[in-house]
Amino acid sequence: MSAWQHLYSSRQWKQLRRHQLAFEPLCRFCLDSDVVEAATVVDHVKPHKGDEALFYDADNLQSLCKPCHDGTKQRIELGQDVVTFGADGWPLG
């Protein structure tokens, strides 16, 4: 467990998470592919690595579905190439 894992149980984070999902209820990555999917995870765009200012920065948050958070986002953070596809099945970008 990370040294900063406790931040996710804080009242401030829970309020911020609730606000983010209300503000952006659909997965940002799926929408980029013209797919409508409910977001269930609030992700830090730039990894905070324990920096509390970055952790609680609402401008550093995005809403993602669990598959995008656990797959696509992790590959991006590892520096791997990610190919995304549109609703028509063709690669984007």
Image: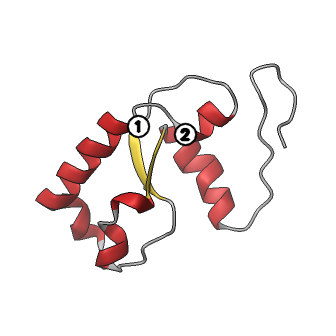
- Whether residue 13 sits left or right of residue 73 in the image: it is left
- Whether residue 7 sits left or right of residue 30 in the image: it is left
Residue 17, image x and y in percent? 28, 48
Quadrant of residue 8 within the rendered picture: bottom left
Q: What residue type is labelled 1?
A: Glu
Farthest residue, direction top:
88
Q: Distance between the residues labelled 2 and 1?
A: 8 Å
Q: Residue at x 60, y 54 (%)?
A: 73
Judge whether residue 2 can be spotted in this image: no
Q: What residue type is labelled 2?
A: Arg
Q: Name the residue under label 1.
A: 24
SS at circle 2: helix
Q: Mark 2 points at which residue?
A: 28
Residue 14, image x and y in percent? 19, 51
* Quarter that holds the N terminus: bottom left
- Cβ–Cβ under 8 Å for marks 2 and 1: yes
